[in-house]
Image (cartoon, rainbow, N blue to C red):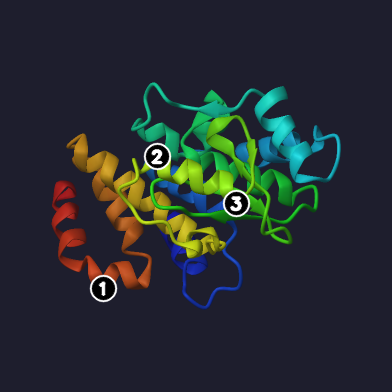
Amino acid sequence: MVRARFAEIMQPGHPGVPLDEAALLISTAIQPGLDETVWLAALDSFAAGCDAPTPEAVAHHLFSTEHFAGNRGAYYDWRNSCLDRVIERRIGIPISLSVLMIEVARRVDVDLVGVGLPAHFLVRAANDENTFFDPFDGGRQLDRAGVRSLFEHVTSGQVPWNERFLEPTPNRDIVIRMLNNLKSVFAERSDAVRLAIVMDMRGAVPELAELEALEIASSAAVFN
């Protein structure tokens, strides 16, 4: 059921991948029995607490009032990539905190998009190409120059800057990047069971299923 629904919404032609549902389906696959409705309701509750339908108000509510923050002490903890755990623990990594901000904003009719820089993830208003927010750093607001400066810092100047990095990242690509992170974390931890679950979910994404067919089959051996 979980994988089938995930496969449905991750089809290339699917109109608009729902980030909240996709993220929670990944969480449910890793944590069987998770009640997605509880965490969807939590997103609704955060939205209800926003003072105004603006990106600034959403950022202030989540990162000042609700005290969400980047997990700098245990960045590679797998729980940082599961939306339910991010909500419960109030900590996460750039992409999961960005998903949180995008989905709370959507509930107050604020259209935000993800911006998937190499090595970092930001958010900006869909209709404003010059104002960005860094959910990992308390929702700090940045202009384009500030984003470039941040990028050069996190990459230690080893990656050439490209203006294309500022383009919106489609929701479907955000979900794939979340799966990429979980794959890396579980492979590094030698967590064969959870890695197999993530690989199975990757198998529900057509291009990943084709590219990683042997790896997906090999990881599934843990269940045999």
71 lies above or below 43: above
Q: First in sequence: mark 1 or mark 3? A: 3
- Secondary element at tag 3: helix
Q: Would you identify the image quadrant in which residue 32 lies?
A: top left
Along the line of sight, which residue is nearer the eye, 112 or 209? 112
Give the spatial CA distance, label 3 vs label 2. 15 Å
Mark 1 belongs to which amino acid?
Glu
Picture residue at 67% right of the left edge, 59% below the top: 129
Along the line of sight, which residue is nearer the eye, 44 or 133? 133
Marks 1, 3: nearer the viewer: 3
For the question of whether residue 194 can be seen, the reply is no
Dot 3, how many residues are within 10 Å of its Cα: few (below 14), some (14-19), or many (20+)? some
Marks 2, 1: nearer the viewer: 2
> From the viewer's perspective, is 65 left or right of 16?
right
Tell me where residue 193 appears, x and y as whole percent.
Answer: 23, 41
Q: First in sequence: mark 2 or mark 1? A: 2
Along the line of sight, which residue is nearer the eye, 219 or 135? 135
> From the viewer's perspective, is 217 left or right of 94?
left
Mark 3 belongs to which amino acid?
Arg
Q: First in sequence: mark 3 or mark 2? A: 3
Q: Can you identify the residue that label 1 sits on?
A: 210
Tell me where residue 139 appears, x and y as whole percent.
Answer: 63, 35
Q: Can you identify the residue that label 2 sits on?
A: 154
Marks 1/3 in contact by CB < 8 Å: the verdict is: no
Q: Would you identify the image quadrant in which residue 31 lies?
A: top left
188 lies above or below 70: below
Q: Can you identify the residue that label 3 sits on?
A: 144
- Secondary element at tag 1: helix
Marks 2/1 in contact by CB < 8 Å: the verdict is: no
Give the spatial CA distance, label 1 vs label 3. 37 Å
> From the viewer's perspective, is 178 left or right of 168?
left
For the question of whether residue 108 can be seen, the reply is yes
